[in-house]
Amino acid sequence: MTLPLANSNEYQSLLSSVGQRIQEAQVRAGLAVNRELVLLYWSVGREILARQQAEGWDAKVIDSLAQDLHRSFPEMQGLSPRNLQYMRAFAEAWPDEAIVQQLVAQIPWGHNVRILDRLKSPEERLWYAQQTVANGWSRNVLVLQIESGLYRRQGRAATNFHRALPNPQSDLAQQILKDPYNFDFLTLSSEARERDMGRALLDHIREFLLELGTGFAFVGSQYPLEVGGQDYRIALLFYHLRLRAFIVIEPKTSPFKPEDAGKMNFYLSAVDDLLKHHSDQPSIGLTLSKSKNQIIVEYTLRDTVKPTGIGDFRLLEELPDRLKGSLPSIEELEAELSSGEDLSEEIRAAPPMDPGSQSG
């Protein structure tokens, strides 16, 4: 029997199939190893905690234990006094073994350490652990979400979803919206216009999508619609994969006004008629304003039929308005750094400084 040709379609298909199986097995093995490691650390921490409470030992026992364990297992990492302290804190933070087995053990140890370090409330720790598992957050993304206070912002936007959408669509839609949205990655002055803000969000689309959350797929900016022979443009158009619905986002650099809802209602009707597939759910609107009056928002949403959310956004608070927009962007800084060689040549070519002109 002849061997298959390495470049044949059949052989390449076999190679791809086997490679995919190996990768899947490696992922499962990695998850299993992580799970066992986290469970080991939890059990060690629980044992240390119980013995300290029973025997009245102080923190010095952890230093002794770390030294003796290192002598017994010299090839094993993670047995430092610092990590043993984390194991003890980990067991103290998660006393319920069922939660550790079902949830926390699915998170890498480094993630668990960040949650321990940065959060004190059991409710917040549990929420961030659940979101990490559900969204597959990396360690850096987890830290970013904690620092941005996502727990306090998620699901807080003012909406009419309980009336405009059926369950469970209304609950899911409510949970994907925040208030306020954190746009600290932008440098905009207080005089910036909506078009400037939309352009700035596109320039930082990765950070913008991260702030919007899991499931948002970018469709277009200044998306054109023709209605009644006239041209209109949606500032930002997204599609949400879990909601199976278009999301129309209109950023406003001024405080929210009731007429903003009328404009959004018009856009949602047009998107439902011109873009929405028959299997899609009703399109959802989100107006992001610089600020809002809660009473005006409540009056506006009271009789609004289309699914509409209203939220605020915040920019970098520590930066004065007079400096926003005047600072260089990341791209501009990179361009400056890349031109450093030319600058060095200019410095080397400059005439030597007269020692007598130096001060001090």
Image: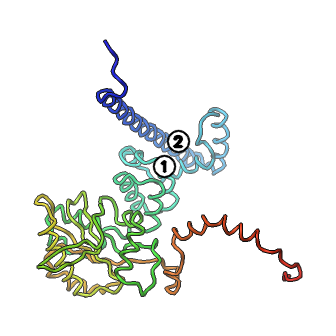
| SS class, disc 1 | helix
Q: Is residue 285 left or right of residue 23?
A: left
Q: Quadrant of residue 250?
A: bottom left
Can you give x and y, in whole percent of width and height, for residue 344 in the image? 71, 67
Can you give x and y, in whole percent of width and height, for residue 354 in the image? 86, 79
Q: Residue furthest top?
A: 1
Q: Residues within 10 Å of mark 2 (few under 14, many from 20)?
A: some
Q: CA distance from mark 2 to mark 1?
A: 8 Å
Can you give x and y, in whole percent of width and height, for residue 1 in the image? 31, 12
Query: Residue at image x 34%, y 66%?
Result: 212
Give the position of the C terminus as an image quadrant.
bottom right
- Residue type at mark 1 is Ala
- Residue type at mark 2 is Val
Asked if labels 1 and 2 touch by Cβ distance under 8 angstroms, the answer is yes
Residue denoted by label 1: 91
Q: Quadrant of residue 10?
A: top left
Residue 277 is marked as none
Residue 258 against residue 93 in the figure, above or below: below
Residue denoted by label 2: 44
Residue 126 against residue 64 in the figure, above or below: below
Can you give x and y, in whole percent of width and height, for residue 158 in the image? 26, 76
| SS class, disc 2 | helix
Query: Residue at image x 59%, y 40%?
Result: 77
Query: Residue at image x 67%, y 34%?
Result: 71
Q: Is residue 310 left or right of residue 117?
A: left
Mark nearer the N terminus (2 vs 1): 2
Q: Nearer the viewer, residue 246 or 289?
A: 246
Q: Residues within 10 Å of mark 1 (few under 14, many from 20)?
A: many
Q: Residue furthest right?
A: 356
Q: Nearer the viewer, residue 291 or 345?
A: 345
Q: Quadrant of residue 13?
A: top left
Q: Is residue 189 left or right of residue 294?
A: right
